Image (tube, rainbow, N blue to C red):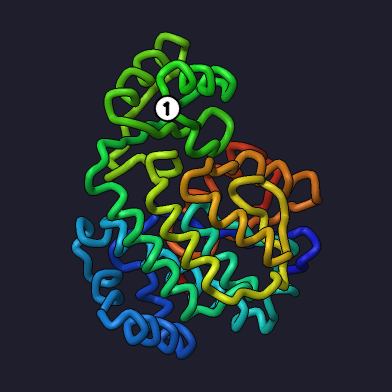
Amino acid sequence: MSNQNATIVFPGQGSQKVGMAQQFYTTQIGKQLIDKADEVLGRKISTIMFEGPQEDLNQTNNAQLALFITGFVACEVLKHEEGKEIIDLAKYLAGHSLGEYTALAQAGVFSFEEGLRLVDKRAKAMFNATQNATGSMAAILNLDIEKVQEVAKNTNTVVANNNTIGQVVISGEKDNIVKACELAKEAGAKRAIELPVSGAFHSPLMQSAADEMAAHIDALEMQDAIVPVVMNVTGKAVSDVATIKQNMKAQITGSVQWVETMQFMQENDITTVTECGAGNVLCGLFKKFNKELTLNNFTTI
């Protein structure tokens, strides 16, 4: 695996499933890191990851940590198997929403332990922001992004994730989301489905969580990335710590520009994509975007 045409990407919420990382736990490096996560967090997140139940794993305060741990551990096992460092395996790193934190940890911006504490704070802040809110999200399928943006503008909702060609997620107040789904169908969307989420993630309704996270991000001493990370809010590669922090702060209320991320990779000669962690959601998005890519899933050993 040459790094010049390769990227490693990390999934976000929605990819968690019971049994995740269990096979990695049979490796020395996996066991070490997962035990360390339980110790740092002061609770057995590993039990929820391995045994569930799925309803508990789906809770944002568990799902985010489980995905961060699984993605990071998968990448460590991959590096060990290949006998290479991250810089030799990937020209760029990226992660979808929460997955961006996994990418930043693998890029050496902060340590695994620091990442765990940061993700724990992010999950709690986002959970708290949903407690009194009436936010929701919906997936709009097979409608041009321009038309989705128009629907969002007319319903006081926002584009939360531009995931791939024909798949856009919007976010906002529940009543507005219902209205937006109706308008999207009228505009020609194949489907408009409300998602089973607890809040309007990646929208201005998350401002309280963003404010809380900004303080945590400022307080943590971070390093420049050793491998550039293509970041969600811009879809551009970043290495310097000041810009990384700025983008991290914008991410909770900002849109995940995944189409722009994939475009950037394509323009910069990426031909191989490896998804580290759980599930194959990101490989699916890349496949829909560009059928010529070589796609690998590293979710088990």
Whether residue 78 is visible here, answered yes or no, is no
Task: Left or right? Give the position of 226 relative to 138.
Answer: right
Circle 1 Cα neighbour tier, 10 Å, few/some/many (<14 / 14–19 / ≥20): many
Residue 21 is drawn in which quadrant?
A: bottom left
Whether residue 149 is visible here, answered yes or no, is yes
Q: Please report the residue visible at 68 percent of the width from the left and 58 percent of the height from the top.
A: 243
Q: Position of residue 17 (x, y in %)?
A: 32, 59
Q: What's under tag 1, amino acid-wise?
A: Thr
Q: Position of residue 288 (x, y in %)?
A: 58, 37
Q: Please report the residue visible at 19 percent of the width from the left and 63 percent of the height from the top.
A: 53
Quadrant of the frame with the N terminus: bottom right
With respect to residue 4, does 247 lie above or below? Answer: above
Q: Nearer the viewer, residue 90 or 136?
A: 136
Q: Nearer the viewer, residue 10 or 237?
A: 237
Task: Left or right? Give the position of 8 relative to 252.
Answer: right
With respect to residue 48, does 148 lie above or below? Answer: above
Q: Secondary structure at mark 1?
A: loop
Name of the residue lying farthest toward the top: 186
Q: Position of residue 139 (x, y in %)?
A: 41, 31
Q: Please report the residue visible at 49 percent of the width from the left and 60 percent of the height from the top.
A: 214
Task: Left or right? Give the position of 215 relative to 62.
Answer: right
Q: How many marks?
A: 1
Q: Position of residue 83 (x, y in %)?
A: 67, 84
With respect to residue 133, does 229 lie above or below? Answer: below
| Residue at the disc numbered 1 | 157
With respect to residue 276, does 78 lie above or below? Answer: below
Q: Please report the residue visible at 59 percent of the width from the left and 20 percent of the height from the top.
A: 146
